[in-house]
Amino acid sequence: MKRYALLGEKLAHSWSKEIHQWIFNQNGIRAEYDLLECRKEELSDLITALKKGQYDGFNVTIPYKKVIIPYLDELSPKAKTIGSVNTVYRKDGKAIGDNTDYDGFLAYVQRKNFSFANKRCYILGSGGASGAVFQVVSDLKGIPVIVSRNPIEQQISYEQLATEPIDILINTTPVGMYPNVDLSPIQKELAERIPLVIDIIFNPLQTKLLLDAHSRQNGLWMLVEQAIKAEERWQETPILCDKEKLYQDILHKIKERNQER
């Protein structure tokens, strides 16, 4: 029985277990997937456990996508370029970090037929997911701008954002994620005038940011796509998967759970 897990600080919002279990069932993979809420101090021991074969792979989420890098033996070229890791696998006794957030966001953008070329794309947040989104926007010939609470060179502040010529806004922060569903990273008046708003949060399906915007998209497709890519890293084979059915099944479960709350 193979064993995988998601590493993060707070995981009550996560649907990764359901998604990966769905993939296991469809592909006849004998495996289990756990949600491991852990502290930064535990990451080293968890990577050691992976290298010893106690785990077969990890996904990594907030706030450890950058923090975990020093504990790994190698990074994929993509993870090295982006500077963050959301997937860890074992090969030849080594713990290797990869970034399938990039694959997930790229596939999501292509599925929705979004055009980023020559568009000014403002990315909220400078954490782990931000780098993957930045790279996708760059590769698709867009003009990415990072918006940060503590801006460094070539970044801007939230205060500056209000006067910028925004074509597309992409939220990569956790602001508005369950259970803090009444929060938004920007004011409603600003959200209303942006041509396209993308929020990579998927729980809730419609964050306050998206409810405030007129043209909006959530991040569930990105989650599904990156999970499939992570499985392909772990299993070292293409994953056979009806993506539309997986998406619809998880969407239905999220809606059901939200109705129970």
Image: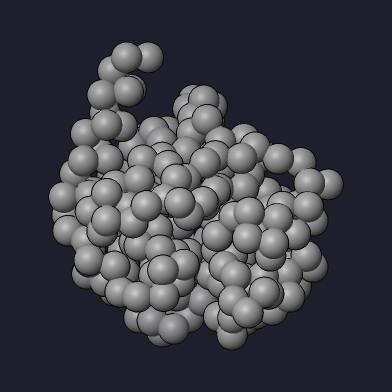
Question: Residue lying farthest front?
Answer: 1
Q: Is residue 142 visible?
A: yes
In the rendered view, would you say 51 is above or below 187? below
- Residue ID at (78%, 65%): 71
Q: How many marks?
A: 0
Q: Residue at 67% across / 70% down in the picture? A: 95
Rendered-image quadrant of the C terminus: top left
Compare residues 122 and 188 and report the one nearer the observer. Answer: 122
Q: How is the image coloured?
A: one colour
Q: Position of residue 231 (x, y in %)?
A: 40, 63
Q: Specify whether 41 is left or right of 5.
A: right
Residue 167 in view: no
> Measured from the top left, where is residue 176 in percent x and y?
50, 35
Q: What percent of the width, then of the height, locates residue 27? A: 26, 59
Question: Which quarter of the picture shows residue 196?
Answer: bottom left
In the foreground, 105 or 254:
254
Query: Residue 66 appears in which quarter of the rendering?
Result: bottom right
Residue 179's place in the image compared with 197, above or below, is above
Residue sitting nearer the eye, 15 or 116: 15
Name the residue: 63% across, 44% down: 8
In the displayed structure, would residue 256 be above or below residue 221? above
Residue positioned most to the top: 260
- Percent position of residue 183, x then y: 53, 30
201 and 77: which one is in front?
77
